[in-house]
Amino acid sequence: MPEKTFKIIELCGVSEKSYAEATKNAVAKASQTLRNLDWFEVVSQRGFIQNGRVAEFQVVLKVGFRLESTTPAD
């Protein structure tokens, strides 16, 4: 089995609709510039209140992506 090594980054996704959409927004944005995205973990959830109402959902994620090998596979 080939060895895998991951790089972990932290992102904050935002949505006016839900925590789930905030998560999807963060992963979609990261996938525009990163390859080999493999997993995510929700670290925290929070929101922004404006005029007594929930105005924004925020999700902090750890996202793991596989590092590419610099040598050819055996």
Image (tube, grey):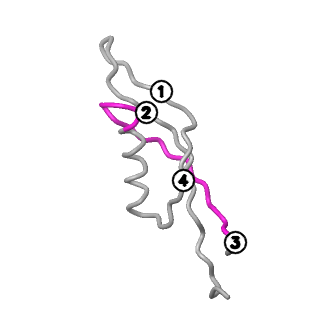
Q: Distance between the residues labelled 2 and 3?
A: 34 Å
At mark 3, the secondary structure is: loop
Q: Which amino acid does label 2 sit on?
A: Gln
Q: Position of residue 74 (x, y in %)?
A: 67, 88
Q: How far apart are marks 1 and 3 (CA)?
A: 36 Å
Q: Please tell me how many numbered marks the rendered image carries.
A: 4
Find the magenta span and give its range: 4-20
Image depth: mark 4 or mark 2 in front: 4
Q: Distance between the residues labelled 4 and 3?
A: 17 Å
Number of residues whose C-alpha sits closer than 10 Å to that of mark 1, classed few (under 14), some (14–19) or many (20 or more): few
Q: In percent of the image, x 57 and y 52: which residue is there?
A: 9
At mark 2, the secondary structure is: strand
Upstream in sequence: badge 4 or badge 3: 3
Quarter of image, res 18: top left
Image depth: mark 1 or mark 4 in front: 4
Left or right, residue 3 beside residue 46: right
Residue under numbered circle 3: 3
Residues marked 2 and 1 touching at CB (< 8 Å): yes
Q: Position of residue 39 (x, y in %)?
A: 54, 53
Q: Where is residue 45 in the image (x, y as percent from the top left)?
A: 50, 30
Up the image or down, 16 lies above or below 69; here it is above
Q: In percent of the image, x 50 and y 60: which residue is there?
A: 37
Q: Position of residue 58 (x, y in %)?
A: 43, 33
Upstream in sequence: badge 2 or badge 3: 3
Number of residues whose C-alpha sits closer than 10 Å to that of mark 2, classed few (under 14), some (14–19) or many (20 or more): many
Up the image or down, 46 lies above or below 12; here it is above
Residue under numbered circle 4: 39
Upstream in sequence: badge 2 or badge 1: 1
At mark 1, the secondary structure is: strand
Image depth: mark 2 or mark 3 in front: 3
**Which labelled disc corresponds to residue 58?**
2
Residue under numbered circle 1: 46
